[in-house]
Image (cartoon, helix red, strand yellow):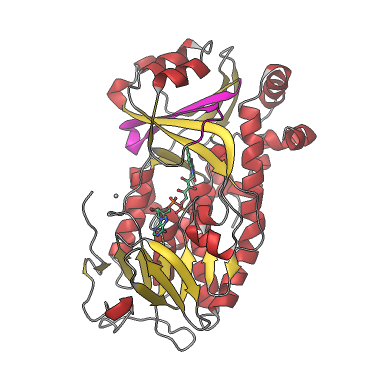
Amino acid sequence: MHPFPGFSGLGATAADALKDGHETPHLAGGPMHPARAGKGGVWLGRLKGESRVAMNGHDLPILVVGGGIGGLATAYALALKGFPVRVLEQAPEFKELGAGIQLGPNIFRALEKIGLKDAVLADAWQPDGMEMRNALTGKHVMRIELGKSAQERFHQPYAVTHRTDIHGACLEACRSHNLVSLENNQRVDAIRDDGATVTVTLQSGEEVKGGAVIACDGLWSKARETIIGDGAPRVSGHIAYRAVLKREEVPEDLWSRDIILWAGPRTHFVHYPLRRGELYNLVAVFHSDHYEEGWNLEGDASVLMEHFKGERPEVLRLLEKIETWRYWVLCDREPIKDWTKGRITLLGDAAHPMLQYLAQGACMATEDAVCIAEKVAEQPHDLPGAFHAYQQQRYLRTGRVQIMSRVYGEFYHARGVTAELRDMMLSSRTQKDSLDSIEWLYGGT
Ligand SMILES: Cc1cc2nc3c(=O)[nH]c(=O)nc-3n(C[C@H](O)[C@H](O)[C@H](O)COP(=O)(O)OP(=O)(O)OC[C@H]3O[C@@H](n4cnc5c(N)ncnc54)[C@H](O)[C@@H]3O)c2cc1C
């Protein structure tokens, strides 16, 4: 669920184990300029004072499918480089479901490049450290300071935030930029590369033309089916239950400024403050073959408690505080090298869905967004070439996170001797050891 740097030292063992309301199409804080919304969705006209780049001689916008964190960060990053973008989102509203997410120093490096670091930090919580505890014995296995020494090392903070808050920061940025058009109730059912342009077909039957498509349509990406066709995501056999409490609902002795992870046999439980400390985020994960597709299903608390039976009272007392849980069946995919076809490419979970054990899915999507905007700006007259360059720059890093996330999950959920071994090895780690082992990720891009 979140990174406890230091696992890389386990070497071979690791490898072996291993939206109510309606959003109006939006420009510059107001409705879409009528001159722009031409017949068939063709982008027309230009607002006064707008500076934009023409691609391949066509003055068509880049179409971004999906308005999650990845889609909005991409739209804004492209707009900052002068490209007009239409974001087509299926939901009736631009909205994030879910609870807290962790933001490693690497996402702040990306957010800084597009001017959104301060906006994201404004509502976030910066924990003093992260601590791993054994959920059976209560032993404090290891602690990593996330304050001064980590910031000096990576030159960026570590923070946790509500998904709504980071998504909201990206949304506001897009709303404030006159090159971004935000369009709801626009489910994309088909995408076609016409050679010099692209055409997407909406659920309504309407066709929309663009210069290219960046599909940020998440884990169950339809675009991926079109350009890769590698079937459904891999079901991990792990389920995450999530809930958020108000600070006053958390017993004083169980509230902590830190991120706390309780590692148990085939389970783990993470908790940390959110939204400037006003909220408290709880995520409980256990092994189960149950499968249901969706992001916001209601979880049965008795099923959860059954899996955590026998764990420390601190764990059980917090779990018992929750009446309504939401759950997600966790899925990922094998890393791939090629997620671009001509004028169509994938980004974020659509390209490289990962388990959340390194807490990096949204971080990787944001890094992708910055990268693709840079590549498009470098070769605006060759979008297929720019997309290829983006993918070349990203696939090894994102693939490594996909693979290592699985490895971290194995360690969090270890049982018996493996768990003892984990605790023994991690407890001897120094702060420097821990930061060294995660340099590849937090120090990257
Ligand atoms: C339990 C859990 C914990 C996590 N914790 C962390 C964490 O701590 N840190 C972190 O960085 N990441 C974390 N993640 C991962 C992170 O949430 C995702 O990687 C990230 O949200 C992916 O963003 P995205 O924009 O690629 O996709 P999504 O957020 O899935 O957005 C896809 C968007 O596309 C839209 N869409 C889909 N299909 C269509 C269509 N056909 N037409 C139009 N629109 C469409 C959807 O409605 C949605 O708005 C966690 C994930 C889970 C499940």
Residue 373: x and y, percent? 49, 69
Residue reaching furthest to the front: 205
Q: Is residue 324 above or below residue 398?
A: above
Q: Is residue 290 magenta?
A: yes
Most distant residue in the bottom direction: 57
Report x, y in % for residue 72. 39, 59
Q: Nearer the viewer, residue 424 or 163?
A: 163
* Residue visible at 28% across and 82% down in the picture: 49
* 177 relative position to 160: left or right: left
Q: Is residue 40 above or below residue 173?
A: below
Instruction: Return the residue nearer the eye: 435 or 404.
Output: 404
In which quarter of the view is residue 371 placed?
bottom right
Q: Position of residue 388 (x, y in %)?
A: 61, 71
| Among the 4 quarters of the image, the one containing residue 280 | top left
Q: Residue furthest right?
A: 12
As rendered, which of 217 and 176 lies closer to the eye? 217
Quadrant for the C terminus in the image: bottom right
Q: Residue at x 68, y 26 (%)?
A: 426
Residue drawn at the location 36% of the way across and 51% of the way down: 167
Q: Is residue 363 above or below residue 160?
A: below
Evaluate whether residue 84 shows in this view.
Answer: no
Q: Which residues are magenta?
A: 265-291
Is residue 39 on the magenta stretch? no
Please state the horizontal and vertical placement of residue 345, each as a whole percent of the image. 54, 66
Report if residue 243 is visible in the image.
yes
Nearer-the-camera pick, 49 or 226: 226
